[in-house]
Amino acid sequence: MKKIILAAAATLLVTIGLQAQDSRLKPDHPDTYVVQKGDTLWDISGTFLSQPWYWPEIWQVNPQVENPHLIYPGDRLNLVYIDGQPRLELERAPTAYKLSPTSNNRLGPSVRREPIGSAIPAIPLDAINAFLSRTRIVGPGAFQGVPYVISGQDQRILMGAGEKIYARGDFREPLSSYGIYRPGPVYADPYTGEELGQQALDIGSVDLRQLDTDNANTEYAVATMDVTRTSRDIRLQDRLLPVEERAIAALFQPGAPSVPVDGVILGVEEGVTQVAKYDVVALNRGLREGLQPGHVLAIYKRGATVRDQLARESVKLPDERAGVLMVFRSFEKMSLGLVLEADKPLAVMDLVRNP
C-alpha cells in the first residue's frame, strides 16, 4: 500500500511539473518560427512563452549544431516534446550553394559562415543600450577628497563633449582618464535602516591633458581635461573618480533568480519618484542576496488598505503585479535594474520579487 501511495505521489509531481511548464507556453504559440532580421531572444521567447525569462528551461541544445547558443536570421525554431516536456530545437537555415570550378560548373554546397556579431542578441540592446547607464553605487566617503570641476573653457559653467574643462584636487597619482560623477542620494534600507550606498550619477568621461601647480594649495594641482563623452551636461563641482571597467555582454541570458528575492525600488536614476519603461531604478538587494546581472524580477504595486464596512475592520488588498525589470549591474548591497515592462504607473517603494 505504501509503495502504491509513493508511486501515485511521484506521478502527481511529474504531472504537476509538466503542467507548470505547459502553462508557460502561450495558448496561441506557434509550432515553428523562422528567425527574422531584427529579432531578439526576448522577442522570440515572448512568441512561445507567457514569461520570456523562462527561455532557458525549454531550450534544447542540439549537439549537431555548431554554436547552438547563437541564433541567426533564417534559422528555424521547432517546438517539440521530449519525455513529455516542451522543448525548442534549433534548425540552421539551409546552406548556401555556389558554382564549383572543379565540377563542370555544377552547383555544390558551401559552408555558411556567419560572424558572431550577426547573431541575434538576447535582449534588444540596440533599443535599450542608451538606458544602461554607467551610474554607480559607491560606499561612504567615496566623494571625499577627490578632484572636482572648477571651470569650463572660457569660464563656462555648463560643458559638453569635445570641450576643455579644468579640475582641481589631489593629482599626486594622476590617471590618464577619469569618469565624471555627480553625488546622488544616500540609500538606506527602508526596513532595517542600514546604509546601503550612495548614487554616483554618471556625467561623462575625460582625458588628462596637463597638470599645473595650484598656487593656493601646494597639495593640489589644476588639471586641464579633454571631455571625451557626456551623458548629461557637466557642471561645476562634479567629481572625478577613476574609470570603472564595465561591460554588458550582448548575449547574456535573462533569467529568474535561483534564490527568493523580496525587495523594493529605492530610487530612480534621475531623482524622480515616478517610474516608467526603460527607467533605471536602484534596488535594496545586491550580490550578498544573490542578485546577478541578467536576473529578471517582477514589480508589484502595494495593495491598498480598505475598510470592511460590514466587519468594521481594516483589510489589506493583495499586491498587484505591474511590470518587469532586469538587473544589469550588481553591487554588494544594491543593484541597478532596467524596467522592461510597465503595465501600470510605477513609483519608488514599489515591491520587486521573483517573477
Image (cartoon, grey):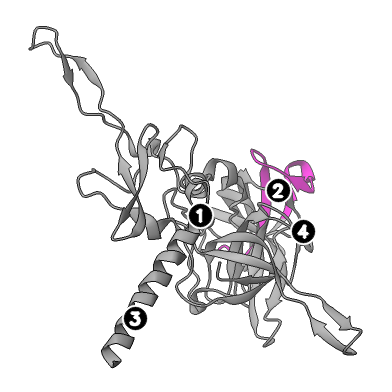
Q: Foreground residue, 186 or 78?
A: 78
Amino acid on which disc 2 is placed: Arg
Q: Which residue lies under the disc numbered 4?
A: 345
**What is the C-alpha distance between the residues marked 2 and 3?**
63 Å
First in sequence, mark 1 or 2: give its number: 1
Task: Specify start and end residues of the magenta stretch as a single range.
Answer: 150-171
Q: Which residue lies under the disc numbered 2?
A: 232
At 35% from the left and 43% from the top, the residue drawn is 78
| Residue 295, position as x, y percentages in the image | 50, 64
SS under mark 2: loop
SS under mark 3: helix
Of the numbered discs in the image, which one, if any, rests on residue 323? none
Q: Foreground residue, 353 or 23?
A: 23
Res. 227 in view: no
Amino acid on which disc 1 is placed: Pro
Task: Give the number of the mark in front: 1 or 2.
Answer: 1
First in sequence, mark 3 or 4: give its number: 3
* Left or right of residue 246, residue 307 in this image: right
Instruction: Check contact, mark 2 vs mark 3: CB within 8 A.
Output: no
**What is the C-alpha distance between the residues marked 3 and 1?**
32 Å
| Residue 234, position as x, y percentages in the image | 72, 50
Q: Which residue lies under the disc numbered 1?
A: 52
At 21% from the left and 16% from the top, the residue drawn is 98
For the N terminus, the image quarter is bottom left
Q: Which residue lies under the disc numbered 3?
A: 8
| Residue 205 falls within the magenta-colored stretch | no
- Position of residue 353 relative to residue 163, above or below, is below
Instruction: Check contact, mark 1 vs mark 2: CB within 8 A.
Output: no
